[in-house]
Image (cartoon, rainbow, N blue to C red):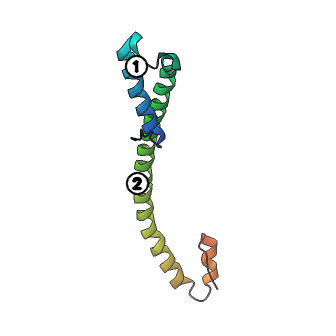
Amino acid sequence: MAKVKIPKSHYEILLLAEEIYNHHKDKGVDSDIGALGWDALKVKIDEGIAYHNEAVEHRLQAEAKFEKRNTLAAEILTIIRKTRDQLKVIHGKELHQLGDYGFTVDD
């Protein structure tokens, strides 16, 4: 016997629901699922898809901002290393003083 699969992904569930709804509407009064409340469900389907699309957009924006942050941090790291090296030369025997600048100094 054939199996009829239902997706597990929330987004794919919404897409399937949209497809079912559209077919239901196309059939009109001849729809086999008219009594199951698909007309009322359309608002929730649209809302769920809109939330998904908004979340994807926010994710893309966040990824772009993380990329910019990482670029800036890499540039800053170069100066931090030079600063550490210079302070190590200046305070060679008293490296604990680098802690005053925020560095963690292991004994």
Residue 98: percent from the left, percent from the top?
A: 60, 77
Q: Is residue 104 above or below residue 50?
A: below
Residue drawn at point x = 46 percent, y = 25 percent: 46
Residue bearing mark 2 = 67
Say which amino acid is labelled 1: His
Residue drawn where x is 40% and y is 48% of the image? 64
Q: Position of residue 10 (x, y in %)?
A: 48, 39
Question: Which amino acid type corresponds to the residue marked 2 in the rendered image?
Answer: Glu
Q: Residue 86 location in percent, x, y?
A: 49, 79
User: Would you identify the image quadrant in which residue 75 lies?
Assistant: bottom left
Q: Which mark is residue 24?
A: 1
The crowding category of the residue bearing disc 1, from other C-alpha atoms within 10 Å (few below 14, some 14 to 19, many at least 20), is some
Farthest residue, direction front: 1
Occupied quadrant, residue 61: top left
Which residue appears at 51% of the width and 76% of the height?
84
Which quarter of the figure has residue 74? bottom left
